[in-house]
Amino acid sequence: MRFIPRFEIAILFLIGFSFSGCAVFSPQSAGTLDLEEHQLAGPPQPDPLSFQPLQGSQEEVLAEHAIERSSVIVQETSTLQGNPAILSQGERKDLLAVLFTAEQGQPEQTVKVMKGDNSIFETKAGLPSPVLPLQGLWTYGGHWALEILLADQDTWAGEIFIDGDLVNELKGYEEAFGLQLLAGKPFFFFRRNGHVGYSYDGQEVEFEYSEVPHYRCCGESSLNPVHADNMVAFFAEQEGKWFYIELGDFDR
């Protein structure tokens, strides 16, 4: 099985970013997470990635948590009998999420979670798009969690399954995305009622942000959240105002 890097843009993000405590509002928290927000003069610019804080400079902002951000999480893609696959990260490395595409008729996609030669779960993943449906497979505390991008003519949304249950349905999310272990605990973003929030270790925090860019490809992929061991860095928009946010367990 041959592994190849999938999110090289995370490395570019690390090179281009450095933040200080400029224009930071009072931190919110869920569990042990701290949130630091920096309002921007306008939307961030991709390729090459750049942004202008209202206070301070891009270099100053990125400098504050540069060490934490350097421990970037890179999801690697492999192939299993010619099908794209990702190996589970976290507590166990014994699961594989594999993408299968129908060979006849419409190229409908299916994701299966495999343990050895056995399929323990499968779900539809829509039709091929510029972004691979396989977004993350994590194990923690005896559980497994899978993130996929469901894409077809009417849908472009993230879905997260925990032990086979669709979290979107259980929690009333319009979508869920950005799955990772953050400081060893499950983290992901969600959208509900037109606003974005996050879930951390089962606790929810809702933002006023209406958008957190994600699932973008090519040059715009630099705007996607960057996930690290103890933090996540991302852009957000609210009523035409743009922000750069660093959210993490900064005391570790």
Image (tube, rainbow, N blue to C red):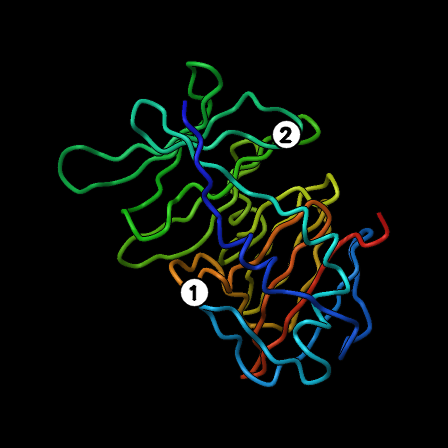
How many residues crowd mark 2 within 10 Å: few (<14), some (14–19), many (20+)? Answer: few
Q: Nearer the viewer, mark 2 or mark 1?
A: 1
Residue nearer the viewer, 67 or 149: 67
Pointer 1 residue: 220
Residue nearer the viewer, 114 or 218: 218
Indicate the position of residue 225 as horizontal and vertical percent values. Answer: 57, 58
Q: Is residue 146 left or right of residue 200?
A: left
Height in image: 88 above or below 246? above
Indicate the position of residue 232 as horizontal and vertical percent values. Answer: 66, 55
Height in image: 239 above or below 18? below
Q: Could you say whether the residue bearing mark 2 is in a helix, strand or loop?
A: strand
Q: Amino acid at mark 2?
A: His
Q: Is residue 163 left or right of residue 97?
A: right
Q: Is residue 194 left or right of residue 130?
A: right
Indicate the position of residue 65 as horizontal and vertical percent values. Answer: 75, 60
| Quarter of the picture holding the N terminus | top left
* Residue 239 in which image quadrant: bottom right
* Residue 64 in which image quadrant: bottom right
Q: Amino acid at mark 1?
A: Glu
Residue at the spot x=51%, y=48% of the render?
Answer: 169
Q: Could you say whether the residue bearing mark 1 is in a helix, strand or loop?
A: helix
Q: Residue lying farthest top?
A: 117
Asked if the residue at tag 1 contacts the one at tag 2, i.e. Cβ–Cβ closer than 8 Å, the answer is no
* Residue 134 in which image quadrant: top left
Q: Residue lying farthest right?
A: 251
Pointer 2 residue: 143
How many residues crowd mark 1 within 10 Å: few (<14), some (14–19), many (20+)? Answer: some
